[in-house]
Amino acid sequence: MSSAIADLSLAELQQRFRNGDISPLEAMEDLLEEIPRRDALTRGYNSVDAEAALAAAEAADPGLPLGGLPIAIKDNINVVGQPCTCSSNILTGTYTSPYDATVIKRLCAAGAIPVGRTNLDEFAMGSSTENSANHTTKNPWDLDRIPGGSSGGSAAVVAGRSALAALGSDTGGSIRQPAALCGCVGVKPTYGRVSRYGLVAFASSLDQIGPLTRTTTDAALLLNAICGLDPADSTSLPEAVPDFTTDLGRDIKGLRIGLPREYFVDGMHSGVRSAVDKAIAQLQSLGAKIVDVSLPHSDYAVATYYIIATAEASSNLARFDGIRYGHRSPDPANLLDCYRKSREEGFGDEVKRRIILGTYVLSSGYYDAYYLKAQKVRTLIRRDFEEAFRHCDVIASATSPTPAFRVGEKTDDPLQMYLADIFTIANNLAGICGISIPCGFAEAGESRLPVGLQLQGKALDETTLLRVAHAYEQSTDWHRQLPPTVSGAHRPPAASC
């Protein structure tokens, strides 16, 4: 079994600090002792700076909003003095961050302590964490299966009890999908709610940082700290930040839950469909009104996303040229050869695939046919959500059409991998908020795997989103279930993994 500290939620540990039951330093020592044993199974971390974490814990003030609470950080968010590898060979061993991302500054100002760098698909490009240049993270519910991506490391350490909470980033579902597959809570805030300054850019008009936690209360606590206007980010919204915990515990009687017919289609795993149907019935039993809505341009979301996201990735990753920072090829013949070899050696296959596609859709003669058209379709998708929210307060669906698939199952079929995010991508295109919460399990072979319920809310209405999610969470016990790696019932990973 895991240690007492590793089993706690952020809110529970916070209460123990304030009761004087344990000090932040004692809690950190306990957690750091637990991480190597627990993470040996899932491999959710890329690195852990124990010395820095212990020093921060010794100086921690439990009276601050997040005083002394340890938070794992996805390895594409800059923390001063620590590596920021993006799980890529182009940055691993060559780059140490000279500054803190705005979210790190805000967490630390609230008293939280960054602990460890979590694994991800290289430059956040993937849905399984198999694209990491470091290693493949495993799902705590079945070590033969993927944890989702790209924030798979963050989801795995939270679900596997080697972290109490973590930060991730979500460009097309990269917080919500791994949260669903690992059985934890993942929030993608409204675009602009959280500063992107210090997040290594993948697709700048889509990226958003958010929390992965065990409970909706913990997610609300982290959002309180990290949201807000940041002059360093031109896309940051000048909107007041409410206390996201205020409406937790309020009933949901009379709230309208919209069911988009385009998200309840043939091809979903039967266990996923069953769990989501039961979750919707549970919301109805809590007093919510179920209404049908339509998102008619949903069929175009995946194609639109993979034009816009790759175009922006092609532009953003041009900075990794072997000259300014990062990996530089040791024996180039000339400057052009330095660019070519450094990028060839530093980037993995999926990153190269997306750079090539993005460069193509931005190229002369194709810009209007692809990128400009995709932006027009994006507008239609956003209008679909605006129209749907005229008839409902929250939209409900599955987060992922299937439970976690096996390691290696889809690596040779990029299109099938891209379709894993079919229910999450439109949210990023529209810029609205979303959350995934545990809602049951699906049987897959010999495995019992978590299913996530996705709730999507109007832009800047995270309060209602969390209210509905919390009401459902507190009426069930899915979030309290322990994966086999924690309960001691895990199987050893297959030799092929």
Image (cartoon, rainbow, N blue to C red):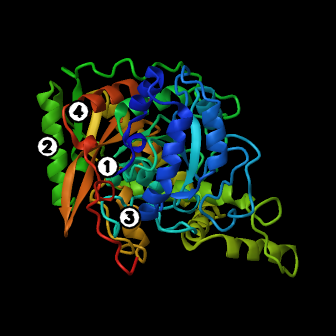
Q: Which residue is mark 3?
A: 146
Residue 83 in the image: above or below residue 328: above
Chain-order first, disc 4 or disc 2? 2
Most foreground residue, 343 or 95: 95
Mark 3 → mark 2, Cα distance in angstroms = 25 Å
Foreground disc of the pair 1, 4 = 1
Q: Position of residue 135 (x, y in %)?
A: 52, 68
Residue 206 in the image: above or below residue 315: above
Say which mark, if any, is on residue 206: none
Is mark 1 in CB contact (under 8 Å) with mark 3? Answer: no
Residue 79 horizontal side relative to residue 427, left or right: right
Dot 3 falls on a residue whose secondary structure is loop
Is mark 3 in CB contact (under 8 Å) with mark 4? Answer: no
Q: Position of residue 65 (x, y in %)?
A: 52, 23
Foreground disc of the pair 3, 2 = 3
Is mark 1 in CB contact (under 8 Å) with mark 2? Answer: no
Residue 492 horizontal side relative to residue 66, left or right: left
Near mark 3 (Cα within 10 A), the count class, few <14, some 14-19 or many ≥20, is many
Dot 4 falls on a residue whose secondary structure is helix
* Tag 3: amino acid: Ile
Chain-order first, disc 1 or disc 4? 1
* Tag 2: amino acid: Lys
Chain-order first, disc 3 or disc 2? 3
Residue 337 lies in what quarter of the image? bottom right
Q: Which residue is mark 4?
A: 472
Q: Look at the image and tell me whether residue 166 can be seen.
A: yes
Q: Which residue is mark 1?
A: 183
Q: Which residue is mark 2?
A: 278
Q: Position of residue 361 (x, y in %)?
A: 58, 63
Mark 1 → mark 2, Cα distance in angstroms = 16 Å
* Tag 1: amino acid: Gly
